Image: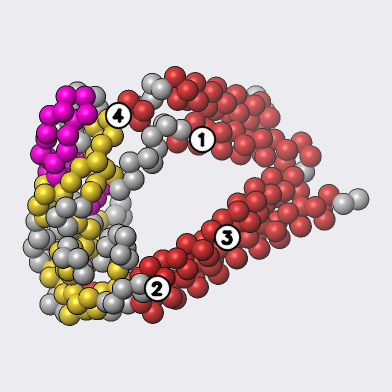
């Protein structure tokens, strides 16, 4: 069996898997589609203890109603519960997922619509088929086709997403400056120690900031960036800019947000230029 046979088998297997995944999605029988999706409400927030671990997120108590029975349930986020809750306040809406008939097996999510069609794996299988086809083209017709096959989609993605990245960054800055800032305070610094496969240990420190919005929501949130000297930040007073629509989007350093905006746009532009360069190189190489 040569490389072309291997690649043909590769493309065939993943194409079949993709078709099965899309058929299951159309039939509405994927695991993601079977899950019940409701909005819950945070009823209580547990303040993190200084020096404790942040792996499990901020402890909360959440209530929600099962739409099939109308029964009310109250759960916590102890253990494996989907997304880690890193920003919380009493009264905040939060997405709740669970298998039918098992409302205590909840997973929390910030976006109820994400992945609801169960197409993540079929789409990934299609991507692997495309990778196999590019490899076949490179073997059959030469390396320029591999460069074109990689650079073409990369360029299209860059053209489509770069304007969106710029608009999103601008809207974020506008939202963060829409209201006067509020005072905040670092109420804890969490500490997590991890060990890699080689036995090397690394320590992560996560400051926890508390602030109250203009409409009275007492927000508790992890902050992994924007604070100088996070290890020694416990007890520090900070100034918080937040978005009126969602206090989970906030910053203690507005200038850092401006720098991040420029960095995101520059990264998107570099990625687009790399795609254009790849297409140009491939096209030139194919020119007789």
Mark 3 neighbour density, 10 Å: few (under 14) some (14–19) many (20 or more): some
Residue 112 x %, y %? 33, 41
Q: Is residue 70 magenta?
A: yes
Q: CA distance from mark 3 to mark 2?
A: 18 Å
Q: Which mark is residue 162?
A: 3
Which residue carries the number 4 mark?
Answer: 35
Residue 257 shows which numbered tag? 2
Q: Which residues are magenta?
A: 62-85
Residue at screen point 69% across, 45% down? 149
What's the residue at 47%, 62% (across, down)? 168
Say whether residue 70 is left or right of residue 17: left
Using the numbered discs, state the Cα–Cα distance from disc 3 to disc 1 in whole angstroms: 22 Å
Front disc: 1 or 4: 4
Is residue 165 or residue 286 the one in the foreground? 165
Whichever of labels 2 and 1 marks the residue nearer the N terminus, that label is 1
Upstream in sequence: badge 1 or badge 4 = 4
Q: Earlier in the sequence, mark 3 or mark 2?
A: 3
**Residue 202 percent coordinates (x, y):** 26, 63
Residue 35 x, y percent position in the rendering: 29, 29
Q: Is residue 229 magenta?
A: no
Residue drawn at x 14%, y 44% is 62
Spatial separation of the CA atoms under disc 4 and disc 2: 37 Å
Q: With respect to residue 42, does 246 lie above or below?
A: below
């Amino acid at each position: 069996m040569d490389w072309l046979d291997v690649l043909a088998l590769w493309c065939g297997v993943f194409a079949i898997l993709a078709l099965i995944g899309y058929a299951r999605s159309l039939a509405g029988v994927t695991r993601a589609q079977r899950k019940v999706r409701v909005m819950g409400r945070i009823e209580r927030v547990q303040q993190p203890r200084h020096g404790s671990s942040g792996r499990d997120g901020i402890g909360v108590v959440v209530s929600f109603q099962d739409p099939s029975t109308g029964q009310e349930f109250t759960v916590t986020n102890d253990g494996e519960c989907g997304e880690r809750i890193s920003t919380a306040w009493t009264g905040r809406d939060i997405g709740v997922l669970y298998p039918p008939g098992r409302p205590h097996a909840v997973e929390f999510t910030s976006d109820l619509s994400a992945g609801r069609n169960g197409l993540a794996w079929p789409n990934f299988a299609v991507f692997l088929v495309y990778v196999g086809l590019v490899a076949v083209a490179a073997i059959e017709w030469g390396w320029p086709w591999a460069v074109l096959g990689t650079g073409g989609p990369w360029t299209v993605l860059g053209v489509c997403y770069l304007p969106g990245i710029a608009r999103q960054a601008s809207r974020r800055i506008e939202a963060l400056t829409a209201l006067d800032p509020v005072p905040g305070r670092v109420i804890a610094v969490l500490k997590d120690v991890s060990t890699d496969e080689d036995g090397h240990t690394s320590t992560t420190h996560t400051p926890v900031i508390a602030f109250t919005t203009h409409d009275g929501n007492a927000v508790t949130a992890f902050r992994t960036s924007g604070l100088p000297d996070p290890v020694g930040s416990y007890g520090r007073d900070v100034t918080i800019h937040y978005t009126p629509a969602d206090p989970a989007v906030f910053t203690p350093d507005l200038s850092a947000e401006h720098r991040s905006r420029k960095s995101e746009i520059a990264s998107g532009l570099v990625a687009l230029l790399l795609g254009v360069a790849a297409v140009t190189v491939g096209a030139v190489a194919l020119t007789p």
